[in-house]
Amino acid sequence: MCGIVGYHGHRKPKDIILDGLKTLEYRGYDSAGVAIFDHGQVKRIRAEGKLSKLESQLQSLDFDGRTGIGHTRWATHGTPSERNAHPHTVDGISIVHNGIIENYLEIRDYLLAMGRKISSDTDSELVAHLIAMEVPKTKDLLGAILNIIPKLEGAYSIVVIWDQKADEIVSFKSGPPLILGIGEKEHIIASDIQAIVPYTKNIIYLEDHEIAQIKGQHYTIYNSKGEVLKKPIVEMHWTVDRARKQGYPHFMLKEIYEQPRTVAAVVKPFISLDTETLDFSNLQKNSTIPDLESELQKLERLVIIGCGTSYYAGLTAEYFIEKIAQIPVEVELASEFRYRNPFLPKNTMVLFISQSGETADTVAALRKVKDMGFYTMSLCNVPHSTIDREAHVRMYMNCDAEVGVASTKAFTASIAFLNIFSLYLGKLKNKVNVAAEKSHVRDVMDLPAQMEKALSYADFFKDHAESLKTFKGFLFIGRGVSYPIALEGALKLKEITYLHSEGYAAGEMKHGPIALVDNKMCVIAIAPKDELFEKTISNVEELNARGANIVSLGTGQNEKLKRLSQQGYLALPDAHWSLTPILSVIPLQLMAYHLSNSLGYDVDQPRNLAKSVTVE
Ligand code: F6R
């Protein structure tokens, strides 16, 4: 969603803000702007469209001030346009805002009744008016902000400057993230860690209802009563390099190719290489539950909650947790769960999967579960993110920054982690003996090398992109553990190619979707050699008989499947059944990538999408 960068320090804010906004481009936006001090006044420049447009407007401008704020906007209230772009400036108050002010109509009516002139369609400008009406009374920015916070409902993170205070930035939040970077005689406030890591590793995550004030060379954190808070400074270990393309044309392609390494990295801390057994002893350190192991031993039900690709990672894990650990699993969409009256029996724990750790629905579902009195676990990629901070047990995807909007390496890292986690739960429940554990661990250790083979199908999709993109639609089918992979394959394709694609359980074809099939339809069949293979192949035969154009993914040289797959057969290495999803999803990621590229779309920043969905 929108991106925020604010800077005060010894360098020129223009460059820092622009560079910061560039690192946030991946989040999705449709306009951008800055407000920077110059000769004692605040100069505001905004532009609709890509950041390069704003950059060219800024090129010839020099600002002598040392304070400024910038924003990339993803439209919620009002069309994408310069008029609606941030910063919004009212009577010397300039603000940038992420999120949604839910009571904006009420505030708007109030402001109009007070005779205020509103010049945009946004909810954000209204907040600038409220602060502008307050500063003449308080004579200081912090006091004005403390007075107007109770008037705001909704989710927001807001950064404010006042043209009367050239060395001050005040920011506050309730919902979307805000991070304060503390450097040498400089401070950066941003919505995303990536805008900060080039300058400092020392950061403070603002919690809801906290206010950060940067004044001269100092910062202070306050609560909503204006009392000073002592907050710990944490060290962030991401480097700038990790967020660069490293020679790849797109972040998504780089991230697809990183997967053998990231899958190895996510399992490594939990495997003892000498004994080829699991070692989850470190998990207790990341837990506020006093005796985590005995709590997990008592576990009678696991609920997994997430959105989009993270939800599909949960659906995939359901198959192996139920089979290997023999614990009932329920997988829920966060956006549904949060508004239901869910029934959670005793000895239930709830696992939240979120790459960003900031997805608004997942955060809300986590808080709901905690309010219900249940233990929560998180599987996040971004350390110190909201979900990571708030869960009782913190687990990690451990795959460095994921920048491409279409999630790839976070998905395979999640599945790989949950795969060994299911083995660990199975051990705790006495469902897995040592021989089975060792054999499974060896299979997991073989996985990165097998993933390299799956990556070799890049050429197939590069070569076939021209013909594949002409089909009227795409059906992805699979059974068992390959069913969520069909859903994920279809999601990847629609996200970045805008082609119509659907994922289905292969056994569901006859219950409706087969009516779509004719010779203009492409079917992607995910049919590894497992106990459901013969069932899947019957479905493929039926689709073949109705003229579908079939691309299939199977295990080794499977002649039967090959014969049915006029558009191509992709042979995947033989792996443990529960690890095949990690292999089969890779060609589907490559397919989405190469088709999108061949259609000429912006792979890393697909239309209408944002990397981190911090509002509902
Ligand atoms: C799809 C994708 C989204 C995210 C979803 C949840 O490629 O990236 O579907 O998976 O928005 O995001 P996180 O995992 O950050 O909670």
Image: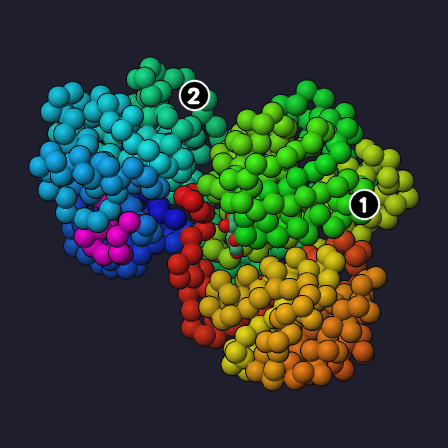
Image position of 337 (left or right of 322): left
Where residue 414 appears, x then y in whole percent? 64, 47
Q: Specify whether tag 2 is near ligand 1 (CB below 8 Å).
A: no
Q: Secondary structure at mark 2?
A: loop
Q: Is residue 479 visible?
A: yes
Name the quadrant containing residue 355: top right
Amino acid type, mark 1: Ile
Q: Secondary structure at mark 1?
A: helix
Image position of 214 (left or right of 371): left
Q: Is residue 48 above or below residue 301?
A: below
Where residue 212 appears, x then y in whole percent? 33, 26
Where residue 7 appears, x then y in whole percent? 28, 37
For residue 386, the mark is: none
Q: Is residue 326 above or below residue 257?
A: above
For residue 231, the mark is: 2
Give the labeled residue for mark 1: 324
Front one among 210 and 306: 306
Amino acid type, mark 2: Lys
Dot 2 and dot 1 residues touching (CB under 8 Å): no
Q: Residue at x 60, y 59 (%)?
A: 488
Is the magenta region chiefly helix, strand or loop? loop
Q: Residue at x 42, y 56 (%)?
A: 609
Which segment is the magenta one?
77-87
